[in-house]
Image: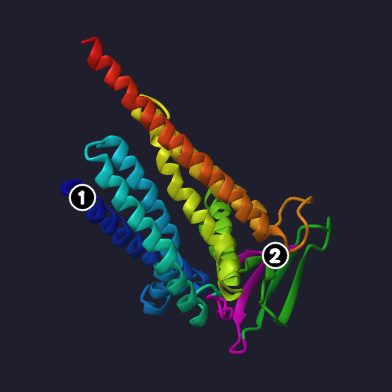
Amino acid sequence: MKTALKLIIAYILMCVCGVAFCGFFFMVCGELNFFVAGSELEISSFNLFIKGMSFSIPGICTVAQLMLILYVIRHPESPIHALVVYILIGCATWCLAFPKLISFSARNGIYTDTRIEQKQLSAGYFRRGNRGIFYYSKVRENGNADGIFIDEKKSDDIVSLFQDKNTYQVSAYPYSDVLIRDAVEPPKIVSVPLGIYRSLMDVAKEKWAGGKMEWLSFASLGFVLLSIYGLQFFSMWNLVNSIVVIFTALVVILLDYIVLLEKLPGIPSGAGGKLALVMNIVLFALFVVYGFSMKLYRICMQKQELEQE
């Protein structure tokens, strides 16, 4: 019973701390979208904070469930209680909490772009454009600017003057200022996983709106991730088991991303959900059978060792 209580408390703490951090991170990133060089950064948007928390809850809860497996690997006492609590947490999360959250998020525009319009740029900075470098000496009230342009593609007469020029820079999107984009744009190792997560959340919203069977094709991903619990018996070494659990979870998520979004050329249009459901059912059965088999094997080996002693 003590183990079960520890798991519940650990899960709640991981979710609360993770969601709060992601909400703050989302708020900062959202404010940076509007920030321009020379102005003061204001981090006080409660709306962005709430959006960030709502957007991150599915991901944080999924990560927290995987962390519970690592906790059980490290503290293997009371395995039956741990398994029951793990199943209850997973089912409550994927069958009750996620559908309600996605429905709420869709109604309140959580998954839509938070950037509404570009903020007016400031004067006195060199900014690189598509064809060269712009220097705005004066920015008018309507957002247009006067200044000089340095054409990097010419060999002579590279400097020219301009007046009342539109300062909008497409290359800066989703930021307002290309200088801020160059300074804070996340590396691929961060932006690619975030892009995959956002795409999966878009699919979740679409599947939830499509009905129960459509939602099941996405929610089956959650049950596969829950069945990874059985991989904790992969090896006698806890470190190897932890690595296997994390690696398998990443592979499963990537496979569902590829199939659900029909990234492979051989997937028929509109069949991604059905293929994902079949694939997840097969993976779920394999992981469950493997987990029970390895657990029974360990029990038999322990009995043999006791008999030999």
Vertical position of residue 104 compared to residue 215: above or below: below
**Residue 132 at least partly seen:** yes
- Viewer can see residue 27: no
- Residue range (magenta): 114-142
Q: Residue at 46% of width from left, 74% of height from top?
A: 39
Marks 1 and 2 sit apart, C-alpha to C-alpha, by 55 Å
Front-most of 111 and 305? 305
Task: Tell me: 105 left or right of 5.
Answer: right
Residue 27 position within the rendered picture, expressed as x and y whole percent measured from the top left: 41, 70
Which residue does the image show at 54% across and 52% down from the upper left? 193
Q: Which mark identifies residue 127?
A: none
Where does label 2 land, which residue?
Answer: 129
Residue that sits furthest to the bottom in the current view: 141
Residue 112: x and y, percent?
A: 56, 75
Q: Main secondary structure of the magenta part?
A: loop
Q: Which quarter of the image is occupied by the C terminus?
A: top left
